[in-house]
Structures are given as C-alpha cells and as structure tokens.
Amino acid sequence: MYKILKKRILAPNICLMEVLAPRVASSARPGQFIIVRVGEKGERVPLTICDHDPAAGSVTIVTQRVGASSRKIFTLEEGESFVDFVGPLGMPSEFIHEDDESLRKKKYLFVAGGLGTAPVYPQVKYLHQKGVHVEVIIGAKTRDLVIMEDEMRQVADRIYICTEDGSYGFKGLVTAKMKGLLDNGTRYDQAVAIGPMIMMKFVTLIAREYNLPLIVSMNTLMVDGTGMCGACRVTVGGQTRFACVDGPEFDAYQVDFDEAMRRQSMYKTQETAADHKCKIGLGND
C-alpha cells in the first residue's frame, strides 16, 4: 500500500498528491511516469511524475477529474492509500544524458498547456539545478485553471501566463504568445511542449517556421502503460512507436499528430459509459 501524505486542490477538478513510494522516489527522472491503482479491481492509470523527493521517499502526482478512474483517484484523501504505485516507467527526458557544461550553453523554452504544466515542472526544476536558462509559457482557459504558478516561478528564469478569456496574463493561446516571442527576436536552442494534442500540433507548426528544435510528450495516449495494450501506438518518423515504452517524449517533427489525435478519441464512448456508472455508484473499485 502506498500512503497519500498530502493532498492539495490546485484548481477545480485538479488535485496534487504526495505519495509515499521510496523506491520510485529514489530512481525517478524527469519525463518518466508511474502507474497507480485505487483498488484491487481498479484500472491501471498512468500518471506523469510531477516531482519526487528521495530523502522523504515521496513522489508527487497531479490528477484531473475527467472520467471514471480519475474520479476514484480524486476521492482519496490524506492517510488513505493506493493499492499499486509502479514506476518509474518510460524513457527519461533526453537532456539528462547531456553534460552540465553543454546544457548551460542552451536556452530552453517550455510550452505547457493545462495539466501539462505538471510534467513540465520537474524538467524545468532539473534544468534550473544545472544552471540552465529556462523560460516557460503556461496556458489555461481561465485564471482559476492556472496551476503550479508559484512552484514554477521558483525554478524558471521567466514565466508567461496565458488565459484564453484574458482573465490573467496574456489574453490568447500559448501559440500566440510563443509566436510573439519569436517574432520579437527572442531565440531559444530547444523547446519542449506538453499539453493537449491539438496544442502540441500547432506549437510544432510554429517551431518549424523558426527552425526551433522541439520535443513533445505523448503521455495523453497512454492507457495500460506497458506497451501490451497497443493503445499508445504513434507513428514517429514513419515507424510505429509506443508512447509508454519508447517515449513518452519524441521529436515533434517526426510525430504524426493527425493519427495520434484519431487514436486518442478511440475510447471516448467507453470512458463516458464507465464514468456514468461511476457517478451512479455502479462501477467497480
């Protein structure tokens, strides 16, 4: 059993949990994920690692309440436990293999959309500890949905907040802010985008205009998290890859986003039905 040490509501339907998982905490790297199960009959749910503290033995995850399984996770409180908390899984971010001197010569731009802010944070934190210049664009529909702003300000050199309704920061999409920065002559050596699939597709189109290297995360495709279910198949450079074992991060210019978006919508009918059962108390634990 993996005890929930802390639970904090970040925004409507979004919560952060610190979970006691010493083995995962001791070996986790930026870009990796874990799999949780709420009960013995529960679904395996892959979640990106938001942070980890080897000394405390804790791992931080962020969950958005959108369907049956995430709704069950959301109901857990401090002191309760997950039955399973497996990881770290997936390939870590490529930059962890670079030497510190090479990294410090680079300037990074991260583009985080919605819940994508959570997996962006550990990457920015890692680079900050290495002395790398990092800027972050955080996007949300409204001010209430902006998450982890304070944490990000402690590790990023500069942050740009964007809200679609203009209730906070720049009014507009993250793509508009990104294009504005590049049009004004700001230059970066590497960009990383994590968020909704459609956002990453258009971030890729903009980055291509400026020959800006870009990495994207296909974590939203993952279902089983081990490669056995095949749900996270994605075409990268004309070859089939699995987001959970070969990724979740890939060269954005090699990803077939249209195919990925079609795959992402495959299970919406089943998830809606499961969510309905969960709401009326008919779902399994």
Image: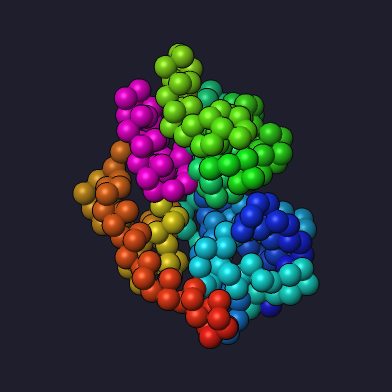
* Left or right relative to 193: residue 169: right
Q: Quadrant of the N terminus?
A: bottom right
Colour scheme: rainbow
Which region is colored magenta?
192-216
Query: Residue visible at 36% across and 37% down?
Result: 202
* Left or right relative to 54: residue 107: left
Query: Residue visible at 71% across and 35% down?
Result: 154
* Left or right relative to 58: residue 93: left
In the rendered image, residue 259 lying in the magenta stretch gets the answer no
* Left or right relative to 72: residue 250: left
- The percent coordinates of residue 279 (x first, y second) are 55, 76
- The percent coordinates of residue 192 (x first, y second) are 46, 38
- Residue 174 at least partly seen: no
Q: Nearer the viewer, residue 57 or 158?
A: 158
- Residue 206 at least partly seen: yes
Query: Residue visible at 31% across and 38% down?
Result: 253
Report the residue that reaches farthest toward the top.
185
- The percent coordinates of residue 158 (x first, y second) are 62, 26
Query: Residue visible at 35% across and 23% down?
Result: 210
**Residue 125 picture quarter:** top right
**Residue 75 picture quarter:** bottom right
124 shown above or below 245: above
3 shown above or below 127: below
